[in-house]
Image (cartoon, grey):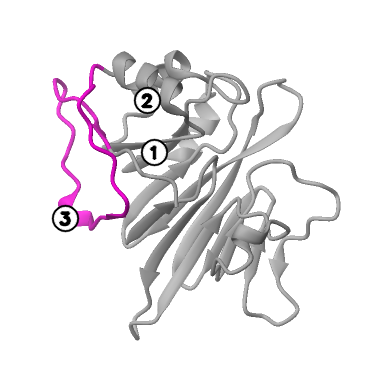
């Protein structure tokens, strides 16, 4: 699986079908923005800024499945579950997505604005391999809240998002990991995910914005 970051909460996850065709799962790519107009998406998820006009289901052409709602979905062998949460004002809905691709469980926290998760939310999130977590500290949770949630969720690997240099530096300091070189692209297989021991630091991958 390949993971690319396009800034803010926007990611594209790429996997292959049984017949070796690429399947693209894209998160928070606003199709009205020119820079996302050519970004491929067989499955398109939306975590926040959801309006009554948003409609979950297949596009008219049938080429794309759009998800902007809570619940469980399985498309092209990819499992997706939308879990309710809140943005920074604790009024607007934010959807946390638990995604399973190639046997890897990915949790995308969206534009999360709270630093606590209920037992029910944790149960739905499940055992996380890769956590995509916001660290902005303005429109989302910041580094202190992110560290708290990482300790709670216990992922094997963390990819920060919604970051600038200051928020990223603060996050890495809070995690006790300063010398991390950012990567232009990132690929991972289930067999390469290192089990996290009690005394191990969680692996952090910093992606460069596409």
Between 95 and 27, the residue placed more toward the observer is: 27
**Dominant secondary-structure state across the stretch colored magenta:** loop
How dense is the environment of label 3, judged by Cα within 10 Å: few (below 14), some, or many (20 and up)?
A: few
Question: Which of pointers 3 and 1 lies earlier in the amino acid sequence?
Answer: 1
| Residue 197 is inside the magenta segment | yes
Q: Position of residue 201 (x, y in %)?
A: 19, 25
How dense is the environment of label 2, judged by Cα within 10 Å: few (below 14), some, or many (20 and up)?
A: some
Q: Position of residue 87 (x, y in %)?
A: 66, 28
Between 28 and 117, the residue placed more toward the observer is: 28
Q: Which residue is mark 1?
A: 131
Identify the residue shown where x is 58% and y is 25%: 140
The answer to whether marks 1 and 2 mark residues whose Cβ atoms lie closer than 8 Å is yes
Residue lying farthest to the bottom in this orientation: 19
Q: Which mark is residue 5?
A: none
Q: Which residue is mark 3?
A: 191
Residue lying farthest to the right in this orientation: 52
How dense is the environment of label 1, judged by Cα within 10 Å: few (below 14), some, or many (20 and up)?
A: many
Question: Which of pointers 1 and 2 lies earlier in the amino acid sequence?
Answer: 1
Q: CA distance from mark 1 to mark 2?
A: 8 Å
Q: Which residue is mark 2?
A: 150
């Amino acid at each position: 699986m390949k993971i690319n970051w396009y800034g803010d909460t926007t990611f594209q996850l790429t996997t292959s079908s049984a017949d070796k065709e690429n399947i693209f799962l894209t998160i928070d790519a606003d199709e009205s923005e020119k820079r996302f107009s050519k970004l491929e998406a067989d499955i398109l998820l939306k975590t926040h800024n959801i309006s009554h006009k948003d409609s979950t289901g297949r596009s008219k052409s049938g080429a794309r499945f759009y998800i902007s709602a809570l619940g469980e979905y399985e498309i092209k062998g990819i499992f997706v579950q939308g879990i309710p949460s809140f943005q920074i004002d604790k009024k607007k809905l934010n959807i946390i997505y638990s995604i399973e691709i190639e046997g890897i469980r990915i949790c995308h926290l969206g534009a999360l604005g709270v630093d606590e998760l209920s037992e029910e939310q944790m149960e739905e999130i499940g055992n996380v391999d890769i956590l995509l977590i916001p660290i902005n500290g303005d429109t989302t949770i910041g580094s202190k809240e992110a560290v708290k949630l990482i300790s709670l969720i216990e992922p094997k690997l963390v990819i920060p998002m919604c970051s600038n240099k200051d928020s990223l530096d603060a996050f890495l300091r809070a995690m006790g990991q300063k010398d991390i070189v950012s990567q232009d692209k990132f690929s991972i297989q289930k067999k390469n995910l290192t089990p996290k021991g009690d005394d191990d630091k969680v692996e952090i991958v910093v992606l460069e914005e596409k």
